[in-house]
Image (cartoon, helix red, strand yellow):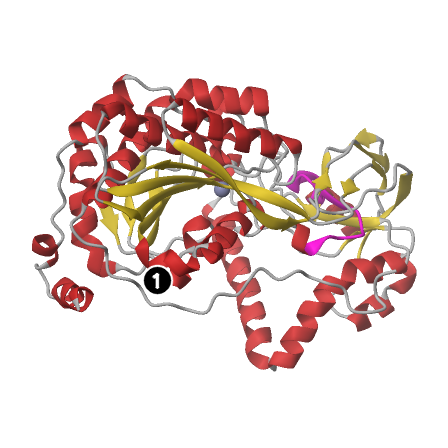
Amino acid sequence: MRRLFLFALLLAPGSARAQLPVDTAGAGRLIEEALQRSDLMPNLQYLSDRIGPRLSGSPAMRRANDWFAEKFRGYGLAASLEAYPFGVTWERGPIAVRLLSPFPRAVTAWSWAWTEGTGGKALAGPVVRVNAATAESLAVYRDRIRGAWLIISDTALVWNPDGPAMTAADSAARRAEQERRQGLARQLNADSSKAARDARQQFGIDRPYLLRKMGALGTITDGGKEHALVTMSGSPNRVSPLPNLVVSHEDFLMFTRQIGAGIAPRLEARIENRIGKTPVEQWNTIGEIRGSEWPGQVVILGAHLDSWDVAQGVTDNGASSVAILEAARVIRASGLTPKRTIRFILFSGEEQGLLGSRAYAAAHAATADSIQAVLVLDNGTGMITGQALQGRDELEQLWKDLLAPVAGLGAGAVRQGMKGGTDHLAFVPYGVPAFNFDQETRGYNHTHHSQSDTFDKAIGSDLRQAAAVMAVTAYQLANLPVLLPRGNRTEVTPPSVARPSPGVAR
Ligand SMILES: [Zn+2]
């Protein structure tokens, strides 16, 4: 009844402000604590330089889980680890890749995560480009596949606005090519039945098994960034038996040029990766400040603590993780007690498909209606610029009011917009108001998932601001007189594990 009433008022222009009065008392104390007495950068340096990268399933991930729990307790919060089923582990081993001809040179390459190595053997063969789009095309290229390193994917469309060769014409051509590819994919999907789409998807899962059976040495993937950086990815839900070398965009282009000129480059690679035998659990770390009036209702501040393993996982997403921890410290140190519980969650498994947050949201589905809001930070080291409304445009005035005390810090911009790709999405299907803060970019598109995601990229003043903004907004949401109206509930599909067709795997 109350919720319906509130919703009606929210939909009436100009009424939301009156109905959702944001109490800004205390914001000044929180901001001062965050900006003047910060623990943030020493904590981030500890995480980055001592614990290092945190691939989900690795010992470092668990060390980070435990360290955050200890830090929460040190700041006077209750803390725990919550387990969920993750999948098999993957351990990146040594790799050595060389170009043998047309000239000898070392090639910097990284294994795509959750792919097999070469069993420690050096495997040499030509780099060959084949059309592997369908089972029929594989049959056509059968003779060229055996004993070769295969290029089966498109050249990445790398956006490097600082690149020396990037003219306006180049940009236009690149955009046109991007649109052409998207158009082709859309057309293909529109033209086919569900059965055909499912079959295509299954072929994509089976393909590395089929290629291995046909004697392929492995595949080569474009690193997809500029200046020899690579974008790492992979998932325990899609383990591959075939080595997959991620090489720089520059080397990928060189191979394709050489092939185009009739020169078959020869490559030798030795890789020792280890895929776990049985599925394991992973953990989310949870810290909590108990509410004084409505302890059963919670505001969640969240970030993913896991990272890729090719650097230190600082901008993605150690910085945000430590900013969440700092927001917890700031609220405790301020001496303010929120009326609702504020829960600080460091998710894992985000990089493999929001596995930690989806598991958390599913495990707590029965109490989803008591989650006031979920606020996630996951866009690099930049200061918070404001909030995207995630389809909850009726909350525009509320967000303006929540951000009013930090508007002077540059965080006051509220916009209509949907953000994808991170943990707040795990809560949206349950009707929970869930948001991902907007941030300054600060080079995030270059650093994230790459070898360049290192501690030197962290910007202390920006992150202290982010901690202040999160402490203030979470505290105010915790004190709001009412629970926010729910969004629409939608169907929740659990993460699916890609399994090869019977008979394909050997
Ligand atoms: Zn991230």
Residue 466 image point, x, y percent:
32, 32
Residue 21 image point, x, y percent:
11, 48
* Residue type pointed to by label 1: Gly
Q: Is residue 482 above or below residue 198?
A: above
Q: 390 or 429: which is nearer to us?
A: 429
Kindly identify the residue that appears in the image at 16 percent across and 39 percent down.
404
Q: 275 or 174: which is nearer to us?
A: 275
Quadrant the N terminus occupies: bottom left
Provide the residue designation for mark 1: 431
Residue 351 image point, x, y percent:
56, 45
Disc 1 under 8 Å from ligand 1? The reply is no
Kindly identify the residue that appears in the image at 61 percent across and 82 percent down.
193
Q: Can residue 450 be seen in this view?
A: yes
Q: How many discs appear?
A: 1
| Residue 439 falls within the magenta-colored stretch | no
What range of the chain is rendered magenta?
238-252
Determine whether the residue tagged by mark 1 lies in a helix, strand or loop: loop
Q: 504 or 135: which is nearer to us?
A: 504
Quadrant the C terminus occupies: bottom right
| Residue 247 falls within the magenta-colored stretch | yes
- Is residue 107 toward the left or the right of residue 340 in the image? right
Q: In this view, does 47 lie above or below 198?
A: above
- Is residue 354 toward the left or the right of residue 474 in the image? right
Q: Can residue 378 be seen in this view?
A: no
Kindly identify the residue that appears in the image at 55 percent across and 78 percent down.
190
Q: In this view, does 444 lie above or below 114?
A: above
Q: Residues within 10 Å of mark 1 (few under 14, many from 20)?
A: some
